Amino acid sequence: MITAVRKPMEEIRGMIAPFKKILIVGCGTCVAECASGGEKEVGLLASALRIDAKNRKREIEIKEMTIDRQCVYEFIDQLTGIIENYEAVLSLGCGAGVQALAEIFPVAKIFPALNTTFIGQTKEPGLWIENCRACGDCKLGDFAAICPVTRCSKSLFNGPCGGSKDGNCEVDPELPCAWNLIITRLEEKGELGRLEKIYEPVDWSKMGKGPRKIMREDQSI
Amino acid sequence: MTSSRLKKILEKGHFAVTSECGPPKGADPKAVQDKGKTLKGFVDSVNVTDNQTGVVRLSSMASCVLLKNEGLEPVLQMVTRDRNRIALQSDILGASALGLRNILCLTGDHQSFGNQPQAKGVFDLDSIQLIQTVRKMRDQGVILGGEKLTLPPDLFIGAAENPFADPLNYRAARLAKKVAAGAEFIQTQCIYNIGRFKEWMVEIRERGLHKKVFILGGITPLKSARMAEYMSKNVAGIDVPAEIIERMKSVPAGDQRKEGIKITIELIKELQGIEGVHGVHIMAIEWEDAVPEIVREAGLAQRPDVD
Amino acid sequence: MKKTNAGKKYAIFFCQQIDKNQDVNRRSIEKEFGPQIRFFPIPCSGRIEPLHLMRAIESGADKVYVVTCPEGACRYREGNIRARKRLLYTQNLIEEIGLERGMLELIRLKAGNNYTVDKLTRELLG
């Protein structure tokens, strides 16, 4: 899933300061799962902004709305006929959602309320970890399903470096060393021999020469 | 084919003595030249660090040329942290064209440790891929992707290895990988735990790696008990045994530098006795003055003449 | 009620488990204080959501209490721990909009005592 965290209130307040009628749009998919942009979070942000406006003796009118997906036209279309009534829109979608809204409603003033952070996994309630950089050329099969691009601070393909200590990374001692994990897991499987091969320089162009796109004839209409 | 002096010394079976020079935090050539003058005649070559620990300093390549003009043989350290493959290959050609003959291929310390923690780390290649790249350029006369060079670079190719980092049981395998990639000499992380180093060398010999690559043991003289404690606690991948820290503490502060030098000399003597160790790499961090004394007292001041 | 508290509005969220007769016991207080106090009995303090606390502030509460059972005594094991975490989260949020953290207060009852909501409320309001 795509994870995100709410921007500081001060930044959000700054963005909407000139406006009185505000639509807050949540997204029910990834950012709802990571508790940053779903219906609940829309409610919280709306409540906080209303309290804040009242304390500053400012007038504000907020409408809350959460759509299933902010990155797909069919869902965004639900805002047609509503969005036009508001001076500004605070999107609690990921970066893709904010841009999709803005593309479909080019006149609306759309602001991001979240900082999109990473592609990750819900490791336990309240803990999300980054484990994919969308490099476009997945090599997890070679590394016991632990991504060296994402989980090694130096993205080494022929690790570990000299900074692995007690199974943790020197860059952040709270962070497990990806290469320690790779080696341990391959050892357990009796597949450590896999690492004898030198990994050739990676083709980073698969990460995009600019924005990437996927086109599928069979899916198009 | 390379005309590296370090290579000749190692090939002739001499116990090599190399050292290190950290460039200044400024555009001051004299700082490099002065360090060169201190070391000249006592060591076979001098490594020049490449923005070590992510701290901006006078460039490694420029400093190497300054040292070369002083009559020393520099080893260009090159990290993949700051340059992509275009810049790395270009600098490899540049180094050779400027007459540098040794390169040490490193990934480099993470940028978050330095004075530019906001920098974007490049890490397009890792150290092993860099070794492979230099080797390809030199031996096959091509760059990555196969395009031919008009003149290949002439460089003796080195790498670093840390026998003390985790996972310990993978460290010899990692050296094997660097050798397979094409490393011709290895300079190790600083050794304080000679016992652990010897264990690692046993593994190295079992794999026959000591016959395929020249291994130089790295040593950093301790300036004080505090430095010993600091390195032990705060620098990942450095193993300072408690006995060394105790020994440093057991002498008064004013004598601790002397004790540090004594320990260094004892370690060098130990290294000389280990099969498969071909030299010592003395990294006296901001303490280059100590090197001549160490080399002299270790009985290594008579450097071989191979030219 | 002390004079300084006169006119202040209170919202009191409390775990129903702490007083089996809360329904009856709170009536006298509600009569006495009228709209100054609003009670929100909840089956377990772990059901508290930040949004409930925000809504209480939005509705004009000057002070919001969350009363939980003693540590280790939660009928649903971890309800009172969750209540504390959510209260902390909400305290951070209101601080970001310039309100005092103290507007939200967690009251964790002591073990071994029998509480009634009316007595407790009088204690809280001094």
Image (cartoon, rainbow, N blue to C red):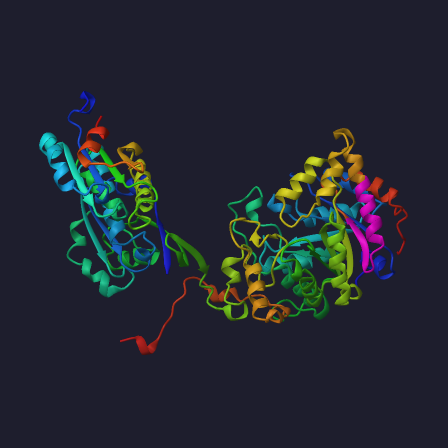
Q: Residue at x 40, y 53 (%)?
A: A127
Res. C65 image quadrant? top left
x%, y% of residue A97? 30, 58
Above or below residue B111? Residue A99 is below
Magenta stretch, residue numbers: B262-281
* Res. B205 visible in picture: yes
Residue located 23% across and 65% down the image: A74
Return the x and y of residue A63 as percentages of the image width and height. 18, 49
Front one among B155 and B252: B252
Q: Which quadrant is the C terminus of chain A positioned in? A: bottom left
Is C55 or B132 nearer to us in this picture? C55
Where residue B42 appears, as percent x and y from the top left, is 85, 45
Residue at 11 percent across and 34 percent down: it is: C30
| Residue located farthest toward the bottom when viewing the structure as drawn | A218
Is residue B277 in the magenta section?
A: yes
Q: Quadrant of residue A162?
A: bottom right
User: Quick one: A168 or B68, which is closer to the camera?
Assistant: A168
Taking A149 as reference, is B55 left or right? right
Residue B50 falls left or right of residue A49: right
State the residue at coordinates (29%, 61%): A71
The tally of labels here is 0
Q: Is residue A90 magenta?
A: no
Q: Can residue B57 be seen in the rendering of this structure?
A: no
Q: Quadrant of the N terminus of chain A?
A: bottom left
- Up/down of B58 relative to B271, above or below: above
Residue closer to the observer: B3 or A201? A201
